Image: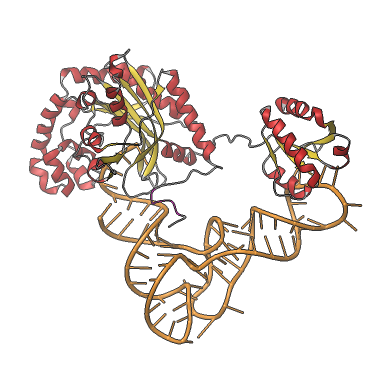
Amino acid sequence: MLTQAPRGTKDVLPQESYRWQAVEAICRRVAALAGYREVRTPVFEHTELFLRGVGDTTDIVQKEMYTFEDKGGRSITLKPEGTAGAVRALVEHSLYAGPLPVKMYYLSAPIFRYEAPQSGRYREHHQFGVEIFGAAEPTSDAEVIALAMRMLTETGLDGLSVSVNSIGCPACRKVYNDALRAFLAERIDTLCDTCKDRYQRNPLRILDCKNEKCQAQLTEAPSMLEYLCEDCQAHFEGVKAALTALDIPYQIDPRIVRGLDYYTRTVFEIIMRADGGASLAVCAGGRYDGLVEMLGGPSMPGMGFGMGIERVLMLLDQKGVAVPEPRLFDVYVAAIGAEARIPALALTEGLRATGVKVEMDHQGRSLKAQFKSADKCGAPKVVIVGGDELARGAVKLRDMETKEELEIPLDKAVEIIKGGIAHA
RNA sequence: GAGGGAGUAGUUCAGUGGUAGAGCGCCAGAUUGUGGCUCUGGAUGUCGUGGGUUCGAACCCCAUCUCUCUCCCCA
């Protein structure tokens, strides 16, 4: 237990963190291209924020939150999703009063959900997410979706397609919920227990049920799309037209309803197929025009998505997309004998000061062993400090590939070696 | 919350009642200051944890923890 990470968590080790950094760098760059700047909000918030924001009938709130009381008696929750905190910050700092739209992204943001860990699912995972406030036009929906697609494409993934749907506004959704209840009324006995409950509280959610029996009942069910009001209909048409214009492959999936209560109109998912055959969303999001107001701000439209970094990495693995690994060292400084160690260290630090990546031995190992480790760490050059050369103020520089060695004066070593590396 | 599979060296695993093993990795050596290949040698295990059965348990039984996968739900 002592030396075991808690269930559902994972260490990112030094030898693999470059993969994360590569994906993160792409996220930042792509977000910046569209004017999104980073927001960093706390890892925990008042529990109430999520009760109101995410919705107290959702699974996330009902059974997956890490909630505890702090020493001041406040109910605190580790964030189970990224949007609520961003909206809270928007409202708290009155960002809505500045130039619109407000665009922000978050990254390296741990998200916590208490659920059974399995492939691509953790109790702590990390999301890159984007939020845009104050933009209601369908082009903003498309911009956000395009950003997600570009981000994924730039990591080297391809063949991804977007599933979109519109779940309307509160007004037309109410009409639809009534229609759906009417449709399901005579079939309610064949639904699973969860869906019986959903029937009362939120029949829309039944569409999302993975139970085959429930799905079988739904083939003839009315579609939300048929019940969209005029405005919502026009908005959805606008989103589709924009996606088409951008050559973003998409399909309409009336089954997408999302597990968070705050969504309105556009909802979308970018799906990956896991090895086992199950499909997981790498990225999901949508429009939430009522959320800002619900959390105490002005009435203001919003749109965003969350993307699971672990799942992006998993997808890269599955597709065999290699993430280029940066070279760890340019130079290895080897020392012969005890008297050479200090000069070796001085040379090492001198090189590092000019931006060269250098390793040296700190275990007092034999020259042979130092060469082995130079080889292992991939350093293309080795500098040998010691012996006769050191006595006359020189060192040897060996090219590990060509095996060429030349003697260079110690006081010019930094300059010469750095020059050699720069051109390599 | 429900159900499968699995926990033995750093790692991948073999070992099914009688003194803990292999490959890879790691460390060292193969004469005197030089890597990748080869050869030789070496170190490392509370056999997940706790209890039980037995003369004797890595092995059988019970419990527990963890990993992994599926359902549910989600990024």
Please say whether residue A349 is visible from this viewpoint: yes
Residue range (magenta): A4-8
* Residue nearest the viewer, comparing A400 with A257: A400
In the rendering, at what x and y percent does residue A410 appear?
81, 32
- Which secondary structure class fits the magenta region best? loop
Q: Decide if residue A192 is in sight here.
A: no
Could you tell me residue A276's position as x and y percent?
39, 47
Does residue A360 appear left or right of residue A178 in this picture? right
Image quarter in which the C terminus of chain A is found? top right
Residue A5 on the magenta segment: yes
Q: Residue furthest top?
A: A99
Residue B12, image x and y in percent? 53, 57
Q: How is the image coloured?
A: secondary structure
Q: Is residue A390 above or below residue A302?
A: below
* Residue name at image x 78 percent, y 27 percent: A416
Instruction: State the image quarter where residue A214 is shown.
Output: top left
Where, by quadrant of the figure, is residue A353 drawn? top right
Q: Nearer the viewer, residue A69 or A144?
A: A69
B4 vs A224, left or right, is right
Q: How many marks?
A: 0
> Residue at coordinates 71% horizontally, 25% vertically from top-left?
A422
Residue for point 67% across, 42% down: A377
